[in-house]
Every structure is written in structure tokens, then in C-alpha cells.
Amino acid sequence: MYVHFVACFWFYIVNVDKVWIPPLDYIYGWEEQGAFFEKDSVYKYILSFYTSCLFLFGNDLGARTDT
């Protein structure tokens, strides 16, 4: 339940600016920016769930910008 809550909260945060690149698409660079938000809802939930697991377990948290 906690992972679900974090996944939904994370999607809410990244949906505001719509500039987030998921960890799985990071190798493609900024040309894939926004492609995540054009996918269907199931894909967005599964990827948000995966990202929340990475956050909670401390993996794949590399910096992508100066801020």
C-alpha cells in the first residue's frame, strides 16, 4: 500500500511540469522528453510503481540536472 501511495504521489509531482524522463528511458536522452506522458494509464502506473520501488530501496537515484 505504501509503494502504491508513493507511486501515485510521484506521478502527481512529475505530471505538473511534464519534463520527467523515467529511468528506463534515460539512455535515450532529452529527445524522449514527454514521451512518458503520451503513453496509456497502465504503462504510466507501472513505471511510477517501479520508480517508487527504486526510491524506497535506494537504487538508481543519479542526478540528472544541476539542481
Image (tube, rainbow, N blue to C red):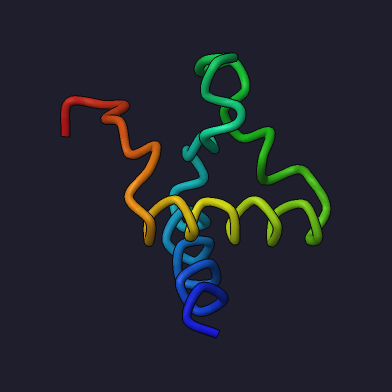
Which residue is at 38% across, 56% downward?
Answer: 57
Which residue is at 55% across, 85% downward?
Answer: 1
Q: Is residue 5 above or below residue 46?
A: below
Which residue is at 60% across, 31% downward?
Answer: 24
Q: Is residue 42 above or below residue 23?
A: below
Residue 3 horizontal/vertical position (percent): 51, 73
Residue 31 horizontal/vertical position (percent): 59, 15
The total of numbered circles placed on residues is 0
Q: Nearer the viewer, residue 64 or 37?
A: 64
Q: Nearer the viewer, residue 57 or 45?
A: 57
Q: Nearer the viewer, residue 35 or 45?
A: 45
Q: Is residue 19 above or below residue 32?
A: below
Residue 41 horizontal/vertical position (percent): 79, 60
Question: Which residue occupies the extreme bottom position in the image?
Answer: 1
Q: Nearer the viewer, residue 19 or 24?
A: 24
Residue 65 horizontal/vertical position (percent): 26, 26
Q: Is residue 5 left or right of residue 65?
A: right
Which residue is at 68% across, 33% downward?
Answer: 35
Question: Which residue occupies the extreme left position in the image?
Answer: 67
Q: Quadrant of residue 33 in the image?
A: top right
Check the picture and name the quadrant holding the C terminus.
top left
Q: Is residue 67 left or right of residue 53?
A: left
Question: Which residue occupies the extreme front position in the image?
Answer: 57
